[in-house]
Amino acid sequence: MNLIIGSHVSFNKNDQLLGSVKEALSYNSNTFMFYTGAPQNTNRCEIDVNKTILADELMKKNGINKDNVIVHAPYIINLANDAKKENYDFAINFLKQELNRCETLGIKNIVLHPGSHVGLGEEKALDNIIYALKQILDKKRYTNILIETMAGKGSEVGKNIDEIKYIIDNVNSDNLGVCLDTCHLSDSGTDINDFNSYLDLFDEKVGINKIGCIHINDSMNEIGSHKDRHANIGFGKIGFEALINVIYNERLENIPKILETPYVTKDDNSKERLYPPYKEEIQMIRKKEFNDKLIEEIRNKNN
Ligand code: FE
Ligand code: FE
Ligand code: ZN
C-alpha cells in the first residue's frame, strides 16, 4: 500500500518551507507538518515566494506530493471561548490570515484544535466554534481546516465523534474536515486495538471521506486518561502493533500520517531534549519492526 508518512518539522523565518522540506527529507519522510511560526504564539513572518519555489522543486525531485503537506494552527487559538470578545475576534481574524498564508504557500490542509470551553460549558463552546468557523470559511477556499479529535484534557471539546459531528454538520462547508490523533483518541476513551469499530462509527456519523490527516502518536497514559501526553511509537500504552494497524489500515490509504512524538530526552526524568527520533521511528514503521532498544540506543549515541 501507498504509505504517506512524515513528522512535525520546524519552519523558520530564514529558510521557510525550503528548510522544512530539507528536514523532512532527512527523516526519509514523504510528507511533513509544520507551524508557520511558534506553536505557542501568533507572531508570523512574511512568506518568501522564492523559498517556496525552491521548496516545490525539492519536493518534486524527491517525490513529495505537496497536497499531503500539513500546517498546524497555533494551539493558543481558542474558538470555543468568547468570554473576552477581543480574543475571540482576534482568533477568527488570525485564522483567516493563516488560511491566506497557507494559500500563498500552496498548502491544502491546516489542522486546528477545536478549543476549550474554560467554564462556558460544552454546548456554548461548540456553538462558538461553529459561529467562528462559519465566518472563517465564508467563501470557497483552496485550503481546508481539519478539526482535530482531542483528548478531553481540561475543558477541551471535540473529544468524541458526536461533538465532531455537531461541528461538521452545522458549519456545513466543503472546506472543513477532520484530523484524527491516535494519542488523543486513546486518551478520550477509544480502543485503538479495535480501530475498525471506531472507523465504522465515524463513517456512519461523519464520513471517512472527511478525514484529511492522521496524527500517529503513542500515549504515555492508559485509555480514557484525558491527559494528552504523547509517547514514542511503541513506547506507550497503545503499543506498536495497534499503531501499525492504524497506519496500514486500507480504509485510510492516501491519508497523510504525521508523527508528533516527543524528542528523546537525556534520561527518563529529564526534560532536556536530545534528539528527534523521527527518522528511526519512520524506519520502524516502514519495516513494521519494533526496536524496543531504540530510545536507549539514541541516548547512548547522543549523551
Ligand atoms: Fe494538534
Ligand atoms: Fe495531534
Ligand atoms: Zn496532543
Image (tube, rainbow, N blue to C red):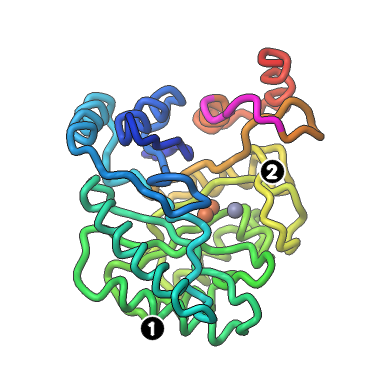
Residue at the (30%, 61%) spot, across then down? 144
Q: Which residue is mark 2?
A: 239
Instruction: Please name the residue shown 33% across and 30% down the image.
Output: 14
Residue placed most toward the observer, 195 or 60: 60
Tell us which disc is closer to us: 1 or 2: 1
Dot 2: element: loop
Q: Residue furthest top?
A: 301
- Image quarter of the C terminus: top right
Q: Which residues are magenta?
A: 272-279
- The furthest residue to the front: 86
| Residue occupying image coordinates x 72% and y 58% | 227
Is 94 on the left or on the right of 245, as rendered? left
Q: Which residue is mark 1?
A: 170
- Sooner in the amino-acid sequence: mark 1 or mark 2: 1
Q: Is residue 273 magenta?
A: yes
Q: Is residue 230 visible in this depiction of the protein?
A: yes
Q: Amino acid at mark 1?
A: Asn
Q: Quadrant of the N terminus?
A: top left
| Mark 2, other Cα within 10 Å: few <14 / some 14–19 / many ≥20 | some
Counting from the top left corner in percent of width and height, residue 282 is at: 52, 30
